[in-house]
Amino acid sequence: MDDSRTERVGQDLGVLPPRVAPRAIRWLALLAMVGCAVGLARVGVYRISKMHPDFEYFYKAGACLLTHGTLDPGYDVINGQVEHRGKLPWYWPCVSRFMTLLAWLPYRPAGYVWVALNTLALLATVRLVGRHLTGLPPQDWPVTQLVPLAVLVVYWHWEFRLNQINNFTLLLLVFSFVCWQRGRALSSGFWLGLAVLLKLTPGLMVVWFILKRQYRVVAAAVVTVVLAGPVSDAVALGPERAVASYRVWLRDAVVDGSHRGLVLAQREVDWRNQAVGAVLSRWLHPTSYSTHFDNDPRHQARDGETTVRMMNVVSLSRSTVARIVLAVEALIALGLLWLARRPARRLTTWQLRFEWSLFLLGMLLLMPVMRRYHMIWALPALTMLGAGVHYSGMRSAWSKLALACIGAVVVAEFALLARSLEAAGSILVSVVLLVVPLAFMLMRLERAPTTLPEPYHGPPHGARLERGDVPRREGVARGLVADART
């Protein structure tokens, strides 16, 4: 059928697909995106060449396990002298085992491979998000993702500057959602389980799948975590050593590393930590926000600040602040649970995508230590806001709110130039502002599911979720348009 008839069919159904961007625009956007990725890679390569953290911690954790069969003790022996340094106390013990894959190489070649993998992961993530979440022509993914990437480029800079692992975590989470959206529940759970093993925080996404009644995804994720985590560690380290390592991890990451533990111990409360607990501690308790590199003795001795800088408006006790923080975290968690309470079969594709991206922001709000580079997890949320603006129209009140909140994210990046502004929680505020339009859109879609038209590139076959559970309204009109084109 010719294009004119396809257009008439689309108009009759109310699902006319948007026009594809000109090829020249797509290529320019792709070149800009690749140029950005290359620039970020150069930052990572430079830091590797100078042997700067954080990749050092990951590499030495794998090297120690590979060479000595033990977890990293957190020190080096240099000229017969013991020099203490940072390590990975808050990561699952299995992360050290994963890093043995690179520890076979010398430090710098391993680091360059790490940077290359990070660069590929970045491009793969934006491609997946652009093709499978925006609801726009999939071939336009460079165009739709250029602005979200540019908005967060400062935070991507820090991800590559520290050669962190959050990029891989985001890729696994996005791939998990895409697989589920395409009806591959077991694959979705597998990739989600790997994301949980890299960072404990993605466990919140398991909760989201439970709320969606996607029990095959949850089961696959749990099995992956158990087999690739504790069971494999027991085989690699031996049962006794594995149990001991997990006891240490539970103490460091779950108990001492919780919001309450950090507030009571006044650890990780410097200006870099944008978590709810750290920000409230700085506002409500006499807390110095200028302590620098308190997790690495070498940098603390060389760069640590002795000047005490505080910004508290009241002087509550640490225990009182800890209780307030727990109450705020509980309210955030309850809000997320309420917004995502309905099963997947009762929701449209748009509702599922908005909820999922909202839970990624929930990860940022609930984690005890949230630094600049963690903000790259906001990429899907920015993408969904952009899609909502496209389909709602620039004159919509919701679109104006969404654009204002996106602008606030950009403004918050300039606050990084002033330590006092960052200590005040500027990045945390920008996360909260991104939550607002997402939550409003979800409430609008609950009242009127047709607020947004069907996405141009919906899941094939209605995205069979659990034995025939299909997102409401999905696939019917889109299938008719597809049939018209053939």
Image: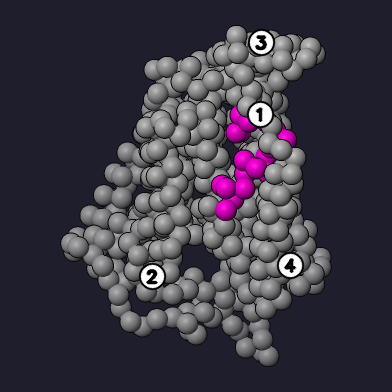
In the image: residue 70, left or right of residue 369: right
Q: Answer with mark 1 or mark 3, whichever residue precedes in sequence.
A: 3
The Cα–Cα distance between marks 1 and 3, rounded to whole angstroms, is: 15 Å
Mark 4: secondary structure: helix
Q: Are marks 2 and 1 in contact (CB under 8 Å)?
A: no
The answer to which quarter of the image holds residue 294 is bottom left
Residue type marked 2? Arg
Tell me the crowding category of disc 3: few under 14, some 14 to 19, or many 20 or more residues within 10 angstroms, Cα based: some
Question: Callout 1 environment at 10 Å: few (<14), some (14 to 19), or many (20+)?
Answer: few
What's the residue type where badge 3 is placed? Answer: Val
10 Å crowding of disc 2: few (<14), some (14-19), many (20+): some
Q: Height in image: 146 above or below 453? A: below
**Tally of numbered tags:** 4
x and y, in percent, of residue 15 in the image: 60, 17
The kind of residue tagged 1 is: Arg
- Disc 1 designates what residue? 19
Comparing marks 2 and 1, which lies closer to the viewer? Answer: 1
Residue 112 included in the magenta stretch of the image:
no
Give me the C-alpha separation between circle 4 and circle 2.
30 Å
Q: Which residue is mark 3?
A: 9
User: What residue is pinned by disc 4?
Assistant: 111
